[in-house]
Amino acid sequence: MERWGVIVILLILMSACQQLPTQPLLQPQLIGEPNIQVSPNEKFPLAAIVTLHSNIKTRVEIEMSYGKNRSTHMKFDEFKQTHQIPILGLRAGREHKLHITLRTPEGAEMTYHNVIQFQAPALPKGFPHIQVKSQVDRMEPGYTLFNIMPHGDNTQLGAMAVIVDHDGEVVWYTLTKHYRDVRKLDNGNILSQQGNQLYIHDMLGNQIRKHVAMGENSRKLIAEQVLTNAFHHEVFPMDNGNLITLSIESRVFENYFDDEKDINAPRKTANVAGDVVIEITPQGDMLYQWRLLDILDPYRIGYGSLVGHWDKTLRKPTKDWTHGNAVIHDPRDDSLILSLRTQDATIKIDRLTGKLIWILSPPENWNEERFGAYRLKAVNPQPYFYPYHQHSPEIMPNGNLMIYDNGSFRSSPFHKKTLPDKAFSRAVEYKINESERTAELVWEYGQDAEQSYFSGALGDADFLPNKRNVLITHGSLKDDRGKQWARIIEVTYDEPKQEVFELTVTDETDKVENGWRVYRAERIADVYPVGG
C-alpha cells in the first residue's frame, strides 16, 4: 500500500506542475526612434549606419528595398540591446526603404511600425561608364570587386575600388589617389596596396591596419613604417595574419646591356633594379627579404628590362630587370610563387630559405648550366606554350597553376617581337610536375575566343569553384582610336567554352587621351560581412 501511496502523490504533483501558468515571452520594444547616418565616411559613400536600442537583448533583421521588385535581406546574429547596424549594398542615387524586425533568443519578435526612407548619394561626375551583360543562372553567384585606374584627365577623380552586382549596378566604391591590389578578406575587411602604403579597412572605411614603406632616402620616422624602399603591385594575406608584398632595390653592374635589340651594342655600367619579397607581421616587422638579384641571373634580360620604371622611386636612372607584379603563398609546401613581367618568368621559391624551386619561362637566354635544372620543360609543346609579360598566378583547387598571359611580344631579346596587331592575351592553366620538372598546358581561353583581345599591361585570371567558370580581366585595352578601356569576362571552364558575363569599363567623353584601366577583378560572395 505504501508503494501505491507514493505513486498517487507523484501523479498529483505532476498534474499540479502541468497546471502552473507558463511564463509569458518578453516582447521586444524599441527605446526611442532608430537613427540612420548615410555615408558616415565620405570616402566610402555607399554605406549607412542604423543605430537603435531595444528594451531587452535582440538581434536585428532588415529588409532593404530600392526599387520595384528589388530588395536585399540582411540578418545580424548578435543579441544585444544597443545596435549599430552597417547598411551595405546601397544603389547610388536611389531611394531606399528599411523594414526593421527585432527577435529575441526565445523567439519573440517585433516589427518596427515605421519604414526608414533615405536616398543614397549619386555617383560623382566623371565616374567610369560600367556596362554589363550577364547570364545570371550560369554565373558564379555574388558580386564583382575590381579596382579602376585613371588615364589622361580622369586623374581628377583618382583611382577607385568598386563592387557591382550581376546587373553592373555599383553597390560600393571608394576613391583614392592610387590603387593597385585590392581584395576582400574572409572576415569582410578590405586589403589594399596604395602606392607605398598597405591598408586594411572595414567596409565602412574604418582603418584596421596600416604599413608605410620608409623609402630609400626617407628621414621621417612614423609608427607604421617598414624599413624597406617601397611596396608595389601585390599584397597577399597569409593564413597566419602576415602580409607578403614586393619591394625594390638597385645594385650597380658593370658591362650591362643597353640595347634589347642588338646583342653586340656597346654595354655600360647600370643601376639594375631588382624585386625584393618581404613578409610583414601585423606589428610591422619584416621576417625576411628575398632578393631576386641573388636568386636569378642579373644579366638575363627580357623585353622591357632596360626601361627606367623605377627611376623616380629610387631617385636615379635604373634598369627594370624583373618588374615583379605578383607574389602568392602556397601553403601546401610553404613556398612563394612570383610573376616577373620583364623576365617573362613565373618562379617558385622556398618561403623559409629563399631557395629556387622551379622556373616557368621561355628557354631563350637562360644560363643552362646554372638554371637548366630548374626550368620546367613543356610536356605538350606548342607555338604559344609559354606566357609572356604575365600577371596574377593562382593555385587552383586541383593544384594546378592559372596565369593571366598578357602575350606581349611573345619573344625574348634578341629575337623578333610579335607586333601588337598579332598579339593576344589569355587565361592559361598549367599542370606542374615538380619531381620531373615539367609543365603541361591543360586549359586556355583567349586565342580561341570568338574575338581575341590584347591587354599589354595589367590583367587577372581567377578560377571560380561553384560554377567551374573562370573570371578574366583584360585590364588595359585600346580601341581603334587608342583610347583606354577594360573588359572583365566570365567564361565556362568546361567545353564548349562560353562567355556568361561581360563587364566593360569605358570613358564616354570625346577625349581620346582619357580612359580607364582595371588592374584586377575578383568575385566575392557578398558585401557582408563587414569585418573589423
Image (tube, rainbow, N blue to C red):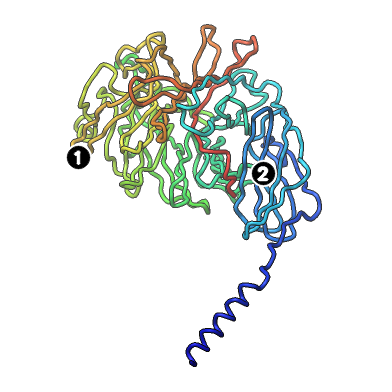
Residue 60 percent coordinates (x, y): 66, 50
**In this image, 491 relative to 350: left or right?**
right
Residue at figure coordinates x 76%, y 43% from the top left: 36
The answer to whether 85 is drawn above or below residue 365 in the figure is below
> What's under tag 2, amino acid-wise?
Ile
The extreme top residue here reads 480
Residue at figure coordinates x 78%, y 43% from the top left: 114
* SS of the residue under disc 2: strand
The answer to whether 357 is drawn above or below residue 22 in the figure is above
The answer to whether 449 is drawn above or below residue 318 in the figure is above
**Residue 309, can we see it?**
yes
* Front one among 19 and 361: 19
Residue hosting label 2: 62
> What's under tag 1, amino acid-wise?
Ser
Q: Are marks 2 and 1 in contact (CB under 8 Å)?
A: no
* Front one among 33 and 7: 7
**Residue 303, can we see it?**
no
Query: Which quarter of the figure has residue 460?
Result: top left
Residue 215 percent coordinates (x, y): 54, 40
Residue 435's tag is: 1
Within-10-Å neighbours for mark 2: few <14, some 14–19, many 20+ = some
**In this image, 387 relative to 121: left or right?**
left
Residue at figure coordinates x 36%, y 20% from the top left: 497
